[in-house]
Image (cartoon, rainbow, N blue to C red):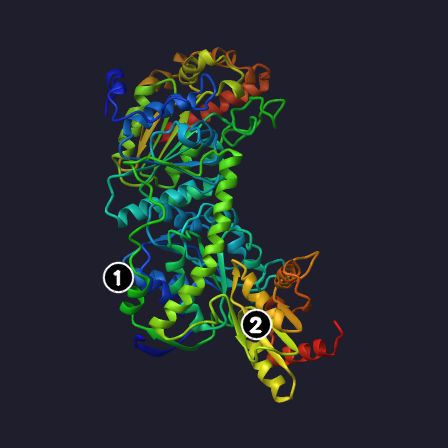
């Protein structure tokens, strides 16, 4: 399902209108505009507590142009299950029930609910936009925070590896699992379209740079996201239950070979959160990146 | 004309499951907990056997059980779940979310005490902790009332003028697992009474996108909460009307829907209680009358909305109230006592109130204990 730049303009309707409350350079809203825009005529959005519950705006000036149900932090996958089952009873199977939330809910507080929905093979798509942090509450460490990153609760740099939610969902027999990036929009949109064409539980995790919490220039969002792929930090891949194979996505292909990768400092130097990363932390970060790749290789 | 019934022996939980089956919810989302479990087991069986055309979501927690119902309610279909005790506590944030979000959901709570001290037996501590959650709360006294109250619940909760979630409460084991005779109407008559949920109070719609539960300013926030308070006020009348409507159709009522008076209209002492203790108190009233003592009873059936006017009107005619609570607000007193005293004070009624806590952790409360408490209260000066 190849998506070109031209396809990005050809959307059923705009999902994100003017007047949203996102910060300048927000990687999450960039991804939202295209990912949800591509399926905007058929989508019901479920939003757990997240930056998205704020940047959607409110009242008559609301910026989300798709039906949106806001839920408690850990409730979104179960609410989505209820909506899906109700729509089934109403004969509206064509609607796409999509969760749009951050890594706070997707990797931490909501993960039991998420695995529950996956276990039941609910026909929903959960999209985690990962800014690697509790962004809304002032930037605390989440289960998806990078090693070495300074956060409000890890002032000397995070020391523990990321919780690999895509792998957890593969282990729990989801229908489809993919990673994506705000730096590669065509790849993201093609994965979202593919996911909603399948029946069952789907997960897409998007790398979404967050200028205020990453202490990065808001003009560098796309560049940082692309560097995460080129340094191997954020491998882009898809896994399909039917083949039980992981396919490395085109933007990431070259970087499976470690010798082709851009030096990780090219990526860290653009982010204030990683400015104080120690030698040891950098080594751990690289080791954790290899851990990810080694897991991926087992399914190739 | 009153519809036909057949007399059946069944537990309170069976009665609850029959009421839910007959109302034909489209989505049931549930998680097991004692003593509620046999309600949802029955319903899963009905769904699997094709007796009930519904989606049954076997969730991984109570938090998700209610969240599943909330998703269904937002989608404009009839929905049902049930819980107890720790389960109710675990779903807490969604209990408040569905109350303040005005979602029509019917969820019986089979009352069970709270840990620590593991015990599966009954008191009202669990549901009482949710009196501020924006749910209608009705405390039933027997198996028949469980069936009737749940059936009424769908019509009340799904009324556009009400749009409040509905929590029928039944004492664990004393009702839930005790077999008693229930006059069971037919499935057809029951469904005719409840009717289709054809004009939903809320329905997510792709043609007309809307945001539910998003950002609000204080002005809108206060308006929403004021609306909720007003809906509760309207619910009082609705419960009374529903009790009458139910009576005309099925041939029985439960007090006036809000409270039930037993015995003489005026007496030296009035026993005030809820749930099965209130049922037992009726035997106590008979016994005391035999002994020549003047005692009557007021059972508070509806706790939310709190029937201030009805309670005040009855209390004005009587001299002394003995309020028996099966739960405690630690650091204060039993919740029913606190609320009774508040409405008497607010309405400048000088009837005296004495409170007793009974039956915590499943302690048996036979009528003899109530008789003894009443005699003590009659002797005390108050």
Q: Is residue B148 left or right of residue B295?
A: left
- The percent coordinates of residue B154 (x first, y second) are 38, 59
Residue A27: x %, y % from top left: 43, 21
What residue is rendered at 47% in x and 67% in y? Answer: B257
Q: Nearer the viewer, residue B147 or A225?
A: B147
Q: Which mark is residue B298?
A: 2
The quarter of the displayed image where residue A122 is located: top left
Q: Are marks 2 and 1 in contact (CB under 8 Å)?
A: no
Choose top left, top right, bottom left or bottom right for residue B212: top left
Tell me: residue B378, above or below residue A4.
below
Of A3 and B229, which appears nearest the observer?
Answer: B229
Q: Is residue B164 visible?
A: yes
Q: Chain of mark 2?
A: B
Q: Is residue A54 left or right of residue A4?
A: right
Locate the C terminus of chain A and report the quarter of the image it occupies: top left
Residue shown at 26% from the left, 61% from the top: B50
Above-or-below relation of B98 to A256: below
At 55% from the left and 15% from the top, the residue drawn is A272
Q: Earlier in the sequence, mark 2 or mark 1?
A: 1
Q: Nearer the viewer, mark 2 or mark 1?
A: 2
Question: Which residue is under mark 1?
Answer: B50
CA gap, disc 2 and disc 1: 43 Å
Write down the quadrant of residue A277 in the picture: top right
Q: What is the secondary structure assignment of the residue under circle 1?
A: loop
x then y, percent, for residue A44: 33, 37
Residue at horizontal 45 percent and vertical 45 percent from the top: B101
Give B133 or B15, whichever is nearer the viewer: B133
- Image quarter in which the N terminus of chain A is found: top left
């Amino acid at each position: 399902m190849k998506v070109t730049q031209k396809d990005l303009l050809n959307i059923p309707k705009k999902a994100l209108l003017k007047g949203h409350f996102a910060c300048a350079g927000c990687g999450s809203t960039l991804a939202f505009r295209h990912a949800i825009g591509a399926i905007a005529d058929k989508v019901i959005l479920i939003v757990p507590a997240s930056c998205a519950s704020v940047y959607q705006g409110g009242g008559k000036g609301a910026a989300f142009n798709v039906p949106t149900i806001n839920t408690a932090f850990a409730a979104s996958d179960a609410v989505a299950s209820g909506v899906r089952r109700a729509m089934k009873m109403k004969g509206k199977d064509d609607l796409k029930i999509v969760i749009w939330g951050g890594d706070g809910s997707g990797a931490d507080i909501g993960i039991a609910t998420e695995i529950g929905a996956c276990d039941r093979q609910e026909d929903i798509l959960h999209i985690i936009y990962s800014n690697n942090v509790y962004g809304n509450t002032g930037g605390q460490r989440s289960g998806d925070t990078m090693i070495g990153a300074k956060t409000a609760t890890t002032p000397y740099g995070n020391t523990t590896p990321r919780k690999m939610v895509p792998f957890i969902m593969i282990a729990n027999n989801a229908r489809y699992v993919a990673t994506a990036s705000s730096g590669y929009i065509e790849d993201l949109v093609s994965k979202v379209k593919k996911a909603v064409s399948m029946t069952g539980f789907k997960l897409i995790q998007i790398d979404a740079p967050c200028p205020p919490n990453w202490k990065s220039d808001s003009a560098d969002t796309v560049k940082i996201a692309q560097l995460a792929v080129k340094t191997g930090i954020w491998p882009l891949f898809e896994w399909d239950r039917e083949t039980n194979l992981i396919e490395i996505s085109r933007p990431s292909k070259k970087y499976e070979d470690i010798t082709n990768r851009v030096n990780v400092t090219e990526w860290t130097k653009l982010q204030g959160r990683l400015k104080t990363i120690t030698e040891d932390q950098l080594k751990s970060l690289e080791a954790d990146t290899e851990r990810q790749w080694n897991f991926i290789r087992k399914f190739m | 004309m009153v519809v036909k019934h057949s007399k059946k022996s069944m537990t309170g939980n069976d009665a609850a499951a029959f009421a839910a089956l007959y109302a034909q919810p489209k989505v049931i989302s549930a998680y097991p907990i004692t003593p509620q479990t046999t309600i949802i087991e029955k319903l899963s069986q009905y769904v699997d056997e094709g007796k009930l055309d519904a989606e049954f979501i076997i969730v991984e927690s109570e938090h998700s059980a209610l969240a599943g119902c909330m998703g269904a309610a937002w989608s404009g279909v009839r929905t049902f779940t049930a819980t107890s005790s720790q389960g109710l506590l675990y779903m807490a944030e969604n209990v408040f979310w569905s109350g303040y979000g005005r979602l029509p959901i019917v969820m019986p709570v089979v009352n069970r005490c709270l840990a620590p001290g593991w015990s599966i037996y009954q008191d009202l501590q669990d549901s009482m902790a949710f009196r501020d959650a924006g749910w209608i709360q009705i405390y039933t006294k027997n198996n028949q009332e469980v069936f009737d109250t749940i059936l009424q619940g769908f019509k009340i909760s799904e009324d556009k003028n009400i749009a409040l979630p509905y929590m029928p409460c039944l004492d664990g084991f004393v009702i839930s697992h005790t077999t008693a005779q229930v006059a069971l109407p037919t499935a057809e008559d029951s469904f005719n009474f409840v009717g289709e949920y054809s004009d939903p109070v809320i329905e997510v719609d792709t043609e007309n996108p809307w945001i539910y539960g998003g950002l609000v300013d204080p002005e809108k926030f206060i308006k929403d909460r004021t609306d909720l308070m007003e809906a509760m006020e309207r619910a009082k009348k609705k419960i009374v009307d529903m009790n009458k409507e139910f009576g005309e159709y099925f041939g029985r009522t439960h007090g006036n829907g809000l409270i039930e008076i037993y015995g003489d209209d005026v007496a030296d002492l009035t026993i005030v209680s809820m749930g099965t203790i209130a049922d037992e108190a009726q035997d106590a009233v008979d016994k005391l009358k035999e002994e020549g003592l003047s005692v009557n009873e007021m059972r508070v059936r509806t706790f939310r909305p709190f029937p201030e006017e009805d309670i005040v009107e009855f209390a004005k005619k009587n001299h002394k109230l003995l309020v028996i609570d099966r739960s405690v607000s630690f650091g204060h007193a039993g919740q029913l006592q606190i609320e009774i005293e508040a409405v008497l004070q607010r309405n400048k009624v000088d009837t005296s109130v004495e409170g007793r806590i009974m039956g915590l952790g499943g302690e048996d409360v036979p009528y003899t204990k109530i008789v003894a408490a009443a005699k003590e209260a009659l002797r005390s000066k108050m």
